[in-house]
Amino acid sequence: MRSVTDELGPFPDAAGYDEARDRDRDDPLAAFRHRFVIDDPDLIYLDGNSLGRLPATTRDVVDRVIDSEWGNRLIRSWNEGWWDLQLEIGDRLAPLLGASPGEVMISDSTSVNLYKLAMAATSHRSSRAKVVTDDLNFPTDIYVLSGVAAANDRRLEVVETGGFIGAAPEVHRAIDDETALLSLSHTTFKSGFTYDVAAMTARAHDVGALVLWDLSHSAGVIPIDLNGAGVDLAVGCTYKYLNGGPGSPAFLYVRRDLQPLLENPIPGWWGHAEPFAFDLEYRPIQGIRRFHTGTIPVLSLAPIAAGISDLAEAGIVAVREKSVSLSEFLIGQWEHHLARLGFELASPRDPGSRGSHVSLSHEEAWPIARAMVELGRVIPDFRAPDNLRLGLPPLYSSHVEIHTAVQRMKRIVERGLHHGYAGSKPTVT
Ligand SMILES: Cc1ncc(COP(=O)(O)O)c(C=O)c1O
């Protein structure tokens, strides 16, 4: 039996190839691929929804920060740009989120930012007993919200969706005048279902609740209009579609008029009005800085700028158009080549309610995922119990890559090559 490694493609005779080639030929963003470090042309990377690729300019940024800012300028660098770096990058990110300058700050992890903003919001709506989310939310969000509810003597209601499509009507029913906070993932991590931010925010505001969105799977890939929708609060990762690098700090957004009304539940010296007065009494600074706790991680923060500048140049509308083209093409390829092999679509069919990854479920998803990596040279990710997530970051993914990846998957499963790959799972899947 031949291994798929003998035939890595492309596969011009397989259905869909001409369409893939034509879509790539007409792709206005095609040139952006060359801005990323891609040193293994046979490897098809479909996991940029988890960890984005390395932008080529990131190396220069890191070299500059290490060699000249840290190595040469030493502590003087705090007054030569470091002190405001998290705000400067936040302001660059703001247009991609439909936010205004001074409303976005890079800080901490998504989980910690969620904690801070959820605590601040529930304290602000102190007479209300309930926090609402749904069961499609990322587990860390549910853990954090449940901790926030417990700490505040509130109740967390997790709306059951019964599938992979968000339950807008059920969420509508769950939010009432007892609700302090509605917190949802805009694009949900498993199926990629995407909520209507404006509609859900309006509904929460109708009953006087605040809204906190997790934008981790949307930032940098879907146009978001936080100001237009009147969103109160948001958080999100920078290491996915924003290509900030492994463990790069997250962002938080607080609508300007809310900033003076909310209290940071982890007040620290970086959020103090006069941090270098070393006053023992906490007096929060005005503006978004008050949501700071401690010192910013300069080395992992600085590279975020490189990822954002490529996206800003490409334009978020063009990025979204390509994302839809990629996911529509992938779903067409699934229907043609994979559906009869036991793969089911586990993402919304309607592109309007889908983010930039497509999930396929299969009862042997884990060994297939392993065989794709080891034999097929395709990197997806696996989400228990049976989900293969295929991420499609528009700046560096192509339709021919998707076509080739589907052909490799098809050959693996048709030939039963995944059967040898059922072994134990590593920590990160
Ligand atoms: C939707 C969502 N929220 C939160 C997180 C967790 O982020 P962090 O580890 O930065 O706290 C993730 C991680 O992948 C995620 O996908």
Image: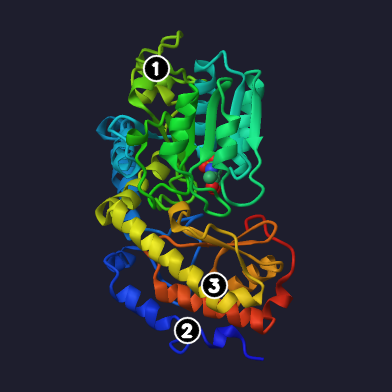
* Mark 3 or 1, nearer chain start: 1
- For mark 3, give the secondary structure: helix
Q: Which residue is mark 2?
A: 15
Kind of residue sitting beneath label 1: His
- For mark 1, give the secondary structure: loop
Residue 144: percent from left, percent from top: 60, 32
| Ligand 1 quarter of the rendering | top right
* Mark 2 or 1, nearer chain start: 2
Residue 315: percent from left, percent from top: 27, 53
Kind of residue sitting beneath label 3: Trp
Q: Is 292 displayed left or right of 315 in the figure?
A: right
Q: Give the CA separation, mark 3 to mark 1.
A: 54 Å
Q: Give the CA separation, mark 2 to mark 3.
A: 11 Å
* Mark 2 or 3, nearer chain start: 2
Kind of residue sitting beneath label 2: Ala
Residue 270: percent from left, percent from top: 41, 23
Q: Which residue is mark 3?
A: 334
Residue toward you, 113 or 388: 388
Q: Give the CA separation, mark 2 to mark 1.
A: 61 Å
**Which image quadrant: the N terminus?**
bottom right
Q: Which residue is mark 1?
A: 272
In the figure, 103 relative to 335: above or below?
Answer: above
